[in-house]
Amino acid sequence: MNRFRGSVLGSAATYLVLCLLAVIFLIPFYVLLRNAFMTTPEVTATDWHWLPSALNWDNFTSLFDNPERPFGRSIVNSLVIAVITAPVSTLLASMAGYALARIAVPGRAAVLAVIVGTLMIPQAVTFLPTFVVVGSMGGVNTMWGLIAPGLFNAFAVVLFRSFYLSFPAEIEEAGRLDGLSYLGVYGRIILPN
């Protein structure tokens, strides 16, 4: 009975802490919605109001009606970039991770060291060189100029390599015995997993 009571109290305490943390993490979302429906004087007022006096939908209509800043087009651009970049960068990182984990070629340790080394460079340092390279290829103010630099993800390569090192080699050997090449093993066995 005491063990059951302790278990219930422990579970209750865990859920209480989780609920408290959930409320803390939802506060910025609440403030965002609160401010979105308030007028500018209400947002900048010195006294705090938990809810807007009246729902102000003008913030949303003015956001989409402003011809100087086409917000709708920005959303479409972000969607296109995400839809292209996410699967392509995942596929490229998966292929690179497989090659680094399973294909024995000279220099693969050096290539891995360079990839891991790029993780130590802050992204802020690479903004200007990336802009210069993309600009020299005519990619300024184009979609491909935004998409191409995001196609290679060094962290994802290291993550995929770690997964492939833990993947059972016997399954790959069975595919090789069935006549599959490295690309066939990757496409038919490794990638689906």
Image (spheres, rainbow, N blue to C red):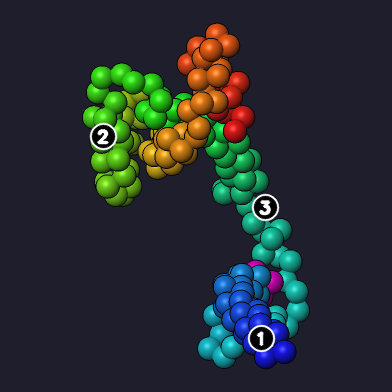
Instruction: Tell which of 181 and 115 is nearer to you.
Output: 181
Q: Quickly name the residue at label 2.
A: 114
Say whether disc 2 or disc 1 marks the residue closer to the N-terminus.
1
Question: What's under tag 3, amino acid-wise?
Answer: Phe
Alpha carbon distance from label 2 to label 1: 54 Å
Q: Quickly name the residue at label 1.
A: 3
Question: What's under tag 2, amino acid-wise?
Answer: Val
Q: How many marks?
A: 3
Q: Secondary structure at mark 2?
A: helix
Quarter placement of the N terminus = bottom right
Q: Secondary structure at mark 1?
A: helix
Instruction: Tell which of 93 and 128 is nearer to you.
Output: 93
Magenta-tinted stretch: 35-39
Looking at the rendering, which quadrant does residue 43 occupy? Answer: bottom right
Question: What's under tag 1, amino acid-wise?
Answer: Arg
Disc assigned to residue 64: 3
Quarter placement of the C terminus = top right
Q: Residues within 10 Å of mark 2 (few under 14, many from 20)?
A: few
Residue 47 drawn above or below residue 184? below
Residue 137 point in image, percent of width and height:
36, 23
Instruction: Tell which of 162 and 56 is nearer to you.
Output: 162
Residue 61 point in image, percent of width and height:
71, 58
Q: Residues within 10 Å of mark 3 (few under 14, many from 20)?
A: few
Instruction: Tell which of 103 and 30 is nearer to you.
Output: 103
Mark in front: 2 vs 1: 1
